[in-house]
Image (tube, rainbow, N blue to C red):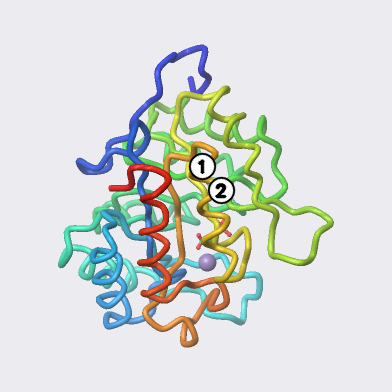
């Protein structure tokens, strides 16, 4: 279903009236995690002012250590929805456990994110395949492109064809940055699938100063959008502080992208 053979034209995914794929480039901005109502309100204001229509933020966080902040859970979804509604933003947030799906629907999450660590959680993929909410399927950090395409097929096989691929960097021998952004996957996916492809430069580089270069490379290579971490006050971020852009940096990134493509 996800293959180019089954569908010749590029698919455009409708996220509550906002298109992902096609001629426009969409930037999804927001903090790594939902912290407080104030932080979410400030983030939403900055994301909206910079020209975005979609916002990111995790309420359930897949942290390496069980002793670090795990997310605010349902309370976080409530804060996120509240902040986003003030600026008419669509919300993107990670689902780690299928048992939370009803709660996600209760807060009308617009896009369900499947994280890198869950790409081959086949039971989770089947569950999001049964509903028709758009899904961002992140590439497993050690997954091949064909494994990634097959993971998407699990979602599509259940009837949900609203899938957006997201490259977020893969593991290699290199240690100078968090992950290697595989820009090469963009033309490969464009050839293999009709579905949109977005790039997360934040989790790839792992440092805020690398984000603009990676973001521009992704758009120049034909990506349909970006998932970018920003924070009203990066030094105080509860999670992934090093890679968060501050509001000015985020706004100037948006400006520089407009020189490459028609960002909304
Ligand atoms: C995230 O986007 O917050 C995240 C945890 O990303 P990834 O699954 O790519 O590590
Ligand atoms: Mn993060």
Is residue 106 visible in this depiction of the protein? no
In the figure, 106 relative to 241: above or below? above
Whole-Å distance between the Cαs marked 1 and 2? 5 Å
Contact flag, marks 1 and 2 (Cβ < 8 Å): yes
In the figure, 244 relative to 53: above or below? below
User: Which residue matches tag 2?
Assistant: 217
Nearer to me, 255 or 242: 255
Percent x, y of residue 179: 69, 58
Percent x, y of residue 95: 45, 55
Q: From the viewer's perspective, tell me whether residue 219 is left or right of residue 140.
A: left
Give the image quadrant in which the ligand numbered 1 is located. bottom right
In the figure, 113 relative to 48: above or below? above
Q: Residue 64 carries which label?
A: none
Nearer to me, 221 or 47: 221
Image point (45%, 45%), residue name = 136
Image point (42%, 76%), residue name = 246
For label 2, count other residues whose C-alpha is less than 10 Å away and answer few (under 14), some (14-19) or many (20+). Answer: some
Quarter of the image holding residue 21? top left
Q: Residue 220 carries which label?
A: 1
Image point (55%, 74%), residue name = 240
Percent x, y of residue 66: 62, 76
Badge 1 marks a residue whose secondary structure is helix
Quarter of the image holding residue 117? bottom right
Nearer to me, 13 or 71: 13
Badge 2 marks a residue whose secondary structure is helix
Quarter of the image holding residue 8? top left
Q: How many labels does the image show?
A: 2
């Amino acid at each position: 279903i996800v293959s180019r053979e089954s569908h010749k034209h590029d698919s455009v995914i409708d996220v509550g009236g906002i298109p992902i794929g096609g001629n426009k480039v969409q930037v999804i901005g927001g903090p790594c995690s939902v912290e407080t109502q104030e932080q979410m309100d400030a983030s939403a204001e900055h994301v909206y002012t910079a020209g975005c229509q979609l916002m990111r933020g995790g309420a359930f966080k897949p942290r390496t250590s069980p002793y670090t902040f795990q997310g605010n859970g349902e309370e976080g979804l409530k804060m996120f929805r509240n902040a986003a509604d003030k600026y008419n933003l669509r919300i993107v947030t990670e689902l780690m456990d299928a048992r939370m799906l009803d709660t996600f629907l209760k807060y009308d999450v617009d896009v369900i994110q499947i994280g890198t660590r869950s790409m081959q959680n086949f039971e989770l993929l089947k569950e999001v395949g049964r509903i028709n909410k758009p899904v961002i399927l992140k590439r497993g950090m050690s997954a091949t492109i064909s494994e990634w395409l097959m993971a998407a097929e699990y979602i599509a096989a259940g009837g949900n064809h609203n899938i957006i691929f997201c490259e977020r960097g893969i593991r290699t021998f290199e240690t100078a940055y968090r992950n290697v952004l595989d820009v090469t996957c963009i033309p490969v996916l464009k050839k293999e699938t009709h579905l949109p492809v977005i790039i997360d430069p934040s989790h790839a580089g792992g440092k805020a100063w690398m984000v603009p270069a990676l973001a521009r490379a992704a758009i120049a290579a034909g990506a349909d959008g970006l998932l970018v971490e920003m924070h009203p006050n990066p030094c105080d971020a509860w999670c992934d502080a090093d890679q968060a852009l501050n509001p000015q940096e985020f706004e100037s990134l948006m400006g520089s992208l407009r020189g490459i493509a028609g960002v909304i």
